Image: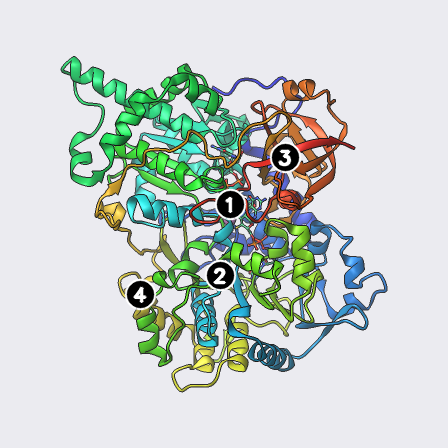
Amino acid sequence: MAEETDLPHDSGPAGGWGSMQGMARILGESHASPMVLRSLRRQNKPKGVMCGSCAWPKPANYSAFEFCENGAKATMWELTSARCTPEFWADDAHTVTRLREWNDHDLELTGRLTHPLRYDAATDRYQAVSWDEAFAAIGASLQALPKESAVFYASGHAGLEASYLYALLARAYGNNNLPQSSNMCHETTSVGLTKVIGSPVGTIVWEDLEKTDAFFFFGQNPGTNSPRFLHPLKDLKDRGGKIVTFNPVIEQGLVSFVDPQNPLAMLTGKETIISDQYHQLKAGGDVAAILGMCKYVVEADDKAKAEGKAEVIDHAFIKQHTTGCEEFIQSCRDADWAEIERESGLTEAALREAAAVYIAAEKVIGVYGMGLTQHTHGALNIAMLVNLLLLRGNIGKPGAGCCPVRGHSNVQGQRTVGIAEKTKLVPLDKLKALFGFDPPTEDGMNIVAAVQGLFEGKVKAFVSLGGNLLRAVPDQKRMETAWSAQELTVMISTKLNRSHLFPGKNAFILPCLGRFEADEQATGNQTITTEDSFSMISASIGDRPPPSDALKSELAIVTGIAKATVPARAELKWDEWTADYGLVRDLIEFTYPDDFRDYNARMYDAGGFYRGNGAHERIWKTPEGKAVFTTPGQLNSLGFKDAPGRYRLITMRSNDQFNTTIYGYSDRLRGLEGSRDILLMCPEDIDEAGLRDGQMLTLVTDVDDGQDRRLGGLKLTAYKLPRGTIAGYYPECNVLVPIGHHDELSQTPASKSVPVRIEAG
Ligand SMILES: Nc1nc2c(c(=O)[nH]1)N[C@H]1C(S)=C(S)[C@@H](COP(=O)(O)OP(=O)(O)OC[C@H]3O[C@@H](n4cnc5c(=O)[nH]c(N)nc54)[C@H](O)[C@@H]3O)O[C@H]1N2
Ligand SMILES: Nc1nc2c(c(=O)[nH]1)N[C@H]1C(S)=C(S)[C@@H](COP(=O)(O)OP(=O)(O)OC[C@H]3O[C@@H](n4cnc5c(=O)[nH]c(N)nc54)[C@H](O)[C@@H]3O)O[C@H]1N2
Ligand SMILES: [Mo]
């Protein structure tokens, strides 16, 4: 059980009245029109709109209100009645340089962007420009540059149709420089999970949630990041199942929940206790913790064998479906409990207790998020979780599997339809057959390569389909200088953000429709589609009036840029595709026939249609043709050693943000209110370091590479954390993360374990 914290940061349960108050506050602040309630009723339902916040799936049997606190906040934030018009820039105080003093929250409060804008260096302001002029200038600038120096970034929001054409634009232009937000997120999953089970995505479907006996949570925070997940968790508890959590931070959504859609529970305040066990391990301690549990499973199996009892390990499954098990089991036997305790920060007794739940359950789902992926050995974290699941055949059977919870609403889908810097992931032959040109065969840049390319001056143009890259990437201070040294910056955005404030020599902001808005093209209102964390594809149809007549859809902006940039060919029917997105879906179906069969017909299915996944059927697309056990080479996921005065910094999300979009300053579920400029540390560490709660501090990155990275003005806040692990907020702490500090295999920035020192003041 989570121990009672003696620190003054108690919060109410997840859900409940607190979530209602949180939504009401955003409704007030965003000035969303009362019609927003109609939009919320359509959220996540067939012929409605799939939530633009996280990628949690939509049940086929939906309820009257199929949205959560944070989904509602995202919708209201998008449907604000505030407008950032060209007149905004007329104000003396609104030069780009002055706006750099504004924080993320205040920039977004200026409202929806209404017109295409071009930066004017003479006045240091953006000015309205016509779409034709913008496209022509962007096309001319891109054509003049060496092909390898332009990057086409996508944040995981835009629908499959616009994303497919965006990838086509990059390839027709001449490169595979298609980094995506997953490069900072679940790329560790794409690479790490593929290595061990031959699938880049999770293996479970909705029915598995209903059949499982237990969830094991590693570094995923559903209360904040995927609140609709709390309902299946409550259902499991109602039917007597178990939940075991591993997280350095006590996250309220994994402690208790009051269902805001259940009137009786709301009136009586009846909480459901979520986690039966809550293990506050050290940041980076998962390898050791999971090894400890596996050691227990191996011991229990040995004992059962000796006593002639039923086996604990699923030997038949292992023999038929896996490789590397013997070596792994030997490493479990050899592992030393004292080392496991030291590396995980958990006791042998606690790990035995967790493992006992694991072996008592017939069907287990392993859930994980950024707490596993954003480490130097993040792929090893994932491989260890897969080891644990494989020992008892918990992949590819009903009620069991591996569940990485994705971030952006279409982040997984964008990869499916070709936004990928790695050419092996894309059927280039199909593209050639469809469009007649030879797509470039050299791999492009991921985020780390693109940022390094910016630092070296090799990257000269950046097109961004959504996102706020300058704020989301490591080494943010260096990025600001490098970003504005570019020849061209093009941001396809809904709201103003900090990335707009470091314009390149030619700089454009191209404002787009949101998902809830009607997208009228020549053949009528268009449908777009997205893929969720369970590989289900669903349609969205917007019906709200756009915030301005001057807006274009994301797809129309992509084709507008393409027409001005890429030499014309008969096969590249940009105008026809813009007129009818159904034609783009036909192209997608031709390119990926196994995934998108009968695409245009099936996209309205309740809960979406399933794209399929080999590992779900126990078909392992690994070189070995089997699922692979991994023997760990080290007992933590860190790329550095502990040293006196060195801490492991977690960069975390609050309940009042969506990535770099800051809704407000209430981290209600952690009992932290009013400021994001804080540093959380346990009282024992505060005492030992001779510091005091409430004092102001500076964090300095403890990496010796000649760069000085520091973040001052942080208020030290005593909080219940393991020794040596400290926490601050993302994106503010991104100035501290070195671009070279990333997962060894996938290059995902290791934002959950940054080595730092503390300085007073
Ligand atoms: N409201 C809201 N929803 C969101 C987002 C948002 O910002 N706001 N972002 C979206 C996106 S893009 C993504 S990727 C997802 C992110 O959702 P999550 O995957 O939940 O990501 P985080 O909140 O960054 O971190 C998850 C948890 O990891 C824990 N953790 C940190 N280090 C470790 C460790 O070493 N081991 C373990 N076991 N745990 C650790 C943290 O305490 C935290 O509770 O959410 C999506 N949904
Ligand atoms: N230190 C640290 N760094 C991190 C993380 C961390 O945990 N710690 N998390 C990482 C993760 S998981 C991710 S996914 C990245 C996120 O990185 P990004 O995806 O680049 O950032 P977002 O904040 O999601 O992008 C927000 C912007 O998208 C635009 N936008 C919103 N809606 C739309 C729309 O409908 N269409 C278009 N075209 N634009 C829209 C708005 O202008 C808004 O300002 O950050 C990563 N960075
Ligand atoms: Mo993400």
Q: What residue is at 48 percent from the left and 49 percent from the top?
A: 747
Tell me the tag on residue 116.
none
Residue 243 showing in the rendered view: no
Residue labelled with disc 1: 742
The answer to whether the residues at label 3 and label 2 have Cβ atoms under 8 Å apart is no
Q: CA distance from mark 3 to mark 2?
A: 28 Å
N-terminal label among 2 and 4 = 2
Which type of secondary structure does the marked residue at label 2 adopt? loop
Residue labelled with disc 2: 445
Q: CA distance from mark 3 to mark 1?
A: 15 Å
Q: CA distance from mark 3 to mark 4?
A: 45 Å
Which type of secondary structure does the marked residue at label 1 adopt? loop
Residue labelled with disc 4: 592
Residue 675, quarter of picture: top right
Q: Nearer the viewer, mark 4 or mark 1?
A: 1
Residue 502, quarter of picture: bottom right
Residue type, numbered disc 1: His
| Front residue (pair 229, 678) | 678
Residue type, numbered disc 3: Val
